[in-house]
Image (cartoon, rainbow, N blue to C red):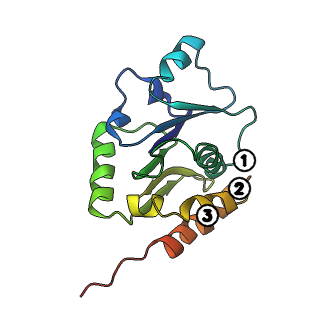
Amino acid sequence: MFITTSNNKDALARAPAFMAWPGPRFLLLLPGHGFDRAALAAAQDRFVLFDFLTAPVSSLSALRQALFRGRYTPDLFASPLLFLETPSTKANIDRQMEAVTEDPFLVADDRAADNGLTRLLLGENIVSNPLFITFIRNLVPDIPNEFTDGAVEAIREHFIWKEPDA
């Protein structure tokens, strides 16, 4: 699945780089996004839209809300997860896909200066774990940026169960 926010101004581009990413695509519309009705109507062909009436406390909080509210979307947890807060190139998206294809247990993230997530990449074996949605549900609903480290570390600790090399 691919999840981005309206901070990613490339999300509504004619041929965005992430269109080949497998699974559903969510666009999180933050207050003041500035997209007009025609652009949003066109986006409905490519995205499940989540319109936030108030700004989420953090990007992790927005991601949590989208995953929890969208949990009944068909095939939501059947592909790797890529969350992007900012625009990215096709080459970068392709590198991310290669990385999760090589390691289905991959957990990778980038942060802004305030410790907010700008990118979260989770391999298919993390996302498809039946306990993943329970983990998401149990996160504090308005989880602030200060707890991003702990949340990402908890994903690593509880969802990576690779067999040791023989």
Q: Which of marks 3 and 2 is nearer the N terminus?
A: 3
- Amino acid type assigned to the residue bearing label 3 in the image: Phe
Q: Position of residue 137 (x, y in %)?
A: 66, 58
- The residue that disc 1 covers is 57
Mark 3 packing: few (<14 Cα in 10 Å), some, or many (20+)?
some
Identify the secondary structure beneath mark 2: loop
The answer to whether the residues at label 1 and label 2 have Cβ atoms under 8 Å apart is: yes
Using the image, determine if residue 95 lies above or below residue 126: above
- Amino acid type assigned to the residue bearing label 2 in the image: Pro
Task: Name the residue rendered at 73%, 53% in the picture.
Answer: 141
Identify the secondary structure beneath mark 3: helix
Q: In this view, does 118 lie to the left or right of 91?
A: right
Q: Residue 135 shows which numbered tag?
A: 3
The answer to whether the residues at label 1 and label 3 have Cβ atoms under 8 Å apart is: no
The answer to whether the residues at label 3 and label 2 have Cβ atoms under 8 Å apart is: no
Q: Nearer the viewer, residue 1 or 112?
A: 1
Using the image, determine if residue 151 lies above or below residue 94: below
Q: Is residue 133 left or right of residue 161?
A: right
Task: Name the residue rendered at 63%, 49% in the picture.
Answer: 68
Residue 105 quadrant: bottom left
Mark 1 packing: few (<14 Cα in 10 Å), some, or many (20+)?
some
Identify the secondary structure beneath mark 1: loop
Residue 104 quadrant: bottom left
- Amino acid type assigned to the residue bearing label 1 in the image: Val
Q: Residue 144 shows which numbered tag?
A: 2
Q: Nearer the viewer, mark 3 or mark 2?
A: 3
- Residue found at the very far top of the displayed protein: 38
